[in-house]
Image: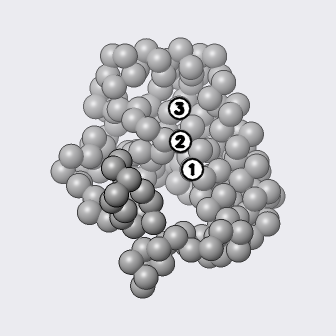
């Protein structure tokens, strides 16, 4: 149980995907973000990463984290796409590549922390499952993605482009 703003109320912590409002989501699956980059929003974390085309189709097949070796090949390929997007002045592609690197880290960590990558037990009102039951190889895979994600975040041209994009477009 998580304590709410007023300490008298408690409510179970529930996954954010329950009751998700698609209509209000900034990213749309029917938009070509290469043709209409002005519609892209940076957002928080990994938002939009599994929706924004054509980047989803370019980056998604590269994204793997089964073990550290596969994670390294995946992260290298995605980072190479990231730098290619940056070289071509394609901020949207670069930001989504960065998000795939971040997602490689967060998803691999989820599998490292929880057996089968499942954090919530839907049969028990989405109670959080026991942590520390996951796969050690996934922790190593997560570390690989983390290094590439930080490398992308620290890219000086990307940082400048991201700050500009957030100021102008959101």
Mark 1 lies on residue: 103
Badge 2 density bin: few <14, some 14–19, many ≥20, Cα 10 Å:
many
Which quarter of the rendered picture does the N terminus lie within?
Answer: bottom left
Mark 3, secondary structure of its residue: helix
In the image, residue 11 lies at what x, y percent? 36, 64
Q: Earlier in the sequence, mark 2 or mark 3?
A: 3
Q: Residue furthest bottom?
A: 123
Q: Does any portion of residue 79 appear in the rendered image?
A: no
In the image, residue 93 lies at what x, y percent? 48, 34
Say above or below: 38 vs 4. Answer: above
Q: Nearer the viewer, residue 56 or 112?
A: 112
Q: Are marks 2 and 1 in contact (CB under 8 Å)?
A: yes
Q: How far apart, in angstroms, are the residues tagged by discs 2 and 1?
A: 6 Å
Mark 1, secondary structure of its residue: helix
1 or 3: mark nearer the eye: 1
Is 63 left or right of 146, judged from the image as shown?
left
Is 3 left or right of 154, judged from the image as shown?
left
Q: Does any portion of residue 75 appear in the rendered image?
A: yes
Say above or below: 73 vs 119. Answer: above
Mark 2, secondary structure of its residue: helix
Q: How far apart, in angstroms, are the residues tagged by discs 2 and 3?
A: 9 Å
Residue 99: mark in rendering: 2
Which quarter of the rendered picture does the C terminus lie within?
Answer: top left
Q: In which quarter of the view is residue 154 placed?
A: top right
Q: In which quarter of the view is residue 63 placed?
A: bottom right
2 or 3: mark nearer the eye: 2
Mark 3 lies on residue: 94
Structure colour scheme? one colour
Badge 1 density bin: few <14, some 14–19, many ≥20, Cα 10 Å:
many
Name which residue lies at 28% across and 58% down: 20
């Amino acid at each position: 149980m998580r304590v709410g703003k007023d300490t008298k109320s408690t409510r179970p912590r529930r996954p954010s995907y329950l009751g998700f409002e698609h209509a209000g989501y900034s990213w749309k699956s029917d938009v070509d973000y290469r043709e209409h980059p002005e519609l892209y929003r940076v957002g928080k974390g990994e938002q939009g990463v599994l929706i924004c085309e054509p980047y989803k189709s370019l980056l998604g097949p590269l994204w793997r984290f089964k073990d550290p070796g596969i994670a390294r090949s995946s992260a290298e390929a995605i980072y190479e796409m990231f730098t290619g997007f940056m070289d071509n002045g394609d901020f949207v592609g670069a930001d989504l590549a960065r998000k795939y690197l971040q997602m490689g880290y967060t998803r691999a960590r989820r599998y490292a922390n929880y057996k089968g990558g499942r954090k919530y037990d839907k049969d028990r009102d989405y109670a959080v499952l026991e942590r520390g039951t996951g796969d050690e190889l996934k922790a190593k895979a997560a570390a690989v993605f983390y290094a590439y994600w930080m490398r992308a975040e620290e890219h000086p041209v990307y940082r400048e482009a991201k700050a500009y994009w957030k100021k102008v477009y959101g």
